[in-house]
Each structure stands twice: as structure tokens, then as C-alpha cells.
Amino acid sequence: MTSAFRTASARTSFARAVLAAGTAVLIALASLPWVATAAVEAFRAVVTVLRGAGHGLLSVEDGFVTAMAVTAVAIPFPALVAFAVPTDSRRATGWAALGAMVLGGLLALRTSTPGTTWVSVVIAIVVGLALGWLVLAAMRAPLAPATPRSRRVAGWVIVVYGVGVLIVGFAGSPVDAGAHPLIIRALDAAHRVGVPDWFGYGALEFTANVLFFVPLGLLVVLLVGARRWWVGAAAGLVVSACIETGQAVFLPARFASLDDVLSNTSGAVIGALVGVVVLGWGARRRAR
């Protein structure tokens, strides 16, 4: 019991320290213009260096790259709040959302277009907090084994899904080639009703690639169990890398991209976390 208390106490202290440090940094960014300017310049320099590596890395819109960075910063907030002030997942996410929105609003006020920036910040934070809630739920879920039913269902579905991945990945031309003009018109219409301009074709393609690989991570975890959730994430990386390599070697009409590997792997990680939550929910239900 003492060891468990010390572990919980250390975790709480660490979470509070990280939250305090993060809050101090965000307040400095919002209140000190020179700090914000230096941070933006440093961020742009890092993005430039990464893009300089080539191979389609971070080839999406600048605003989408910034939004992804904000989302990544927001993801740990629910878990940090839950550990700093022990509470349930939904309440922790709510408190994290309140704090993130206030600090995001302060940052938006420092820009030349506060209204537009605020909308972008809200979208990025909401996505980050939703993913953060998923991470926290997976951390608190029991590491349940796969059941005969989950293996049977996932086994059949993954075969069909795998065929779809092969068709999309190794088609002679991009699957959306014929629909490209329609997609552009739809994006233009979305921008006119308030969707940020940075959500263009590149951002849409990146997001679609994330969603496309969510089922892979989920299905693998349903096959191998929650304790080996990382297998689902690794499957996304391996499958995506093989597809991109195949496109580079055998399909001159396709463009192999590190962005695709990044987005596909991210989707598989999300799917694996969903699998952990689903198996944990099933285990709790059977235990009642």
C-alpha cells in the first residue's frame, strides 16, 4: 500500500509540475510579444528543416502543420489534469478544455486576426482533447485479453479491410484522381461557411489517411488483446511503409510520401487505443 501511495503521490506531483510549467509558458506566450515571436520563429525554423529532408514530409498547408502542433500539445492535458487532481476521465477532460480554451483565447488576442485565429485554435484544441480523452480512457481501462468472439469478428473483417487497403495502396493512380475537381469545389464551399483556409486539399488527404488506418489498429488489438496494443500501432507503420515503398518502386504515377506514413501510423495508434477501450469495456461488462 505504501509503495502504491508513493507511486500515486509521485504521479500527482509530476502532473502538477508539468501543468504549472506549461501554464507558465502559455501565459508568457500570451503576455510577452517577444516570447511569442521567438517561439513562432523557432517553430517555423523546425518545420523548414523537416521539410528540407524531402520525401513529402510536412507537405501539407502551413496552417495545418500549426494546427497539428496545437493538437499535439493539447493531447496530454486530460491525463495531466486527471493525475494532478484525481477525478474521472470526462471531468478531467472538461477542466482541461476550460483551461486550454482560456489560454488559447489569450494567444489569439495577440494576433492580427483574433477571430480567425480563435476558430483555428478551438478546432485544434477540441481534436487534441478528444484524443487526450481516448488516451486517458485507454490508460484506465483493464488490459483485457482478446475474446474468441473478438478474434472471430476481427479475423473476418481484417481480411476484407486488407483487400481494400491493397486496392487503394497499389492502384495505378490515386483513387481520388477523378473526384479532384469535386473535392476542390467542396473545400471552397466549406471555406465560405467558416472552415479555416488552412484546411485545404493536403490537410483533407492527411486526415483521410489517418481515418483510413484507424480500423487496422483496432482490428489488430481485437485479435491480439489489449496488453499488446503496440502491435496494432506497429502494424500501421509497417503496412504504410511497405505501401509507400511499393509505390516508389513500382508505380511511377503514385507519389510515395513520409506524410502518408505519418498519418497512417497515427491512425493505427488511434485505432489501437480504441481497441484497448473496447476490450476493457467488454471485460468490465462480463465481470458484472
Image: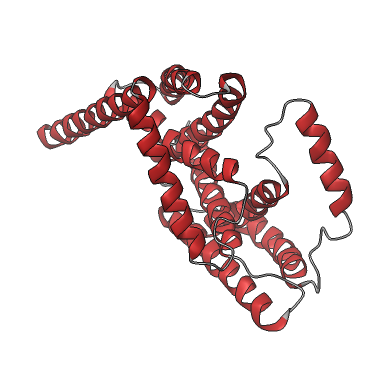
Q: Residue furthest left?
A: 2
In this rendering, would 208 be left or right of 85?
right
Residue 258 versus residue 275: which sits nearer the camera?
Answer: 258
Q: Is residue 285 depicted above or below 256 in this figure?
A: above
**What residue is rendered at 88% in x and 47% in y?**
182
* Residue 168, position as x, y percentages in the image: 76, 65
What's the residue at 48%, 66% (across, down)?
Answer: 53
Whether residue 193 is situated above or below residue 163 in the rendered picture: above
How is this picture coloured?
secondary structure
Q: Can residue 82 be seen in this view?
A: no
Give the quadrant of residue 251.
Answer: bottom right
Residue toward you, 228 or 244 = 244
Q: Nearer the viewer, residue 107 or 253?
A: 107
| Residue 288 in view in this figure | yes
Which residue is located at x 45 percent, y 54 percent? 229
Q: Quadrant of the N terminus?
A: top left
> Of 235 and 141, which appears nearest the observer?
235
Could you say where residue 194 lies in the image, as x and y percent from the top left?
73, 26
Q: Image point 82% across, 46% down: which residue?
A: 184
- Residue 43 lies left or right of residue 3; in this view the side is right
Q: Total of numbered circles in the picture?
A: 0
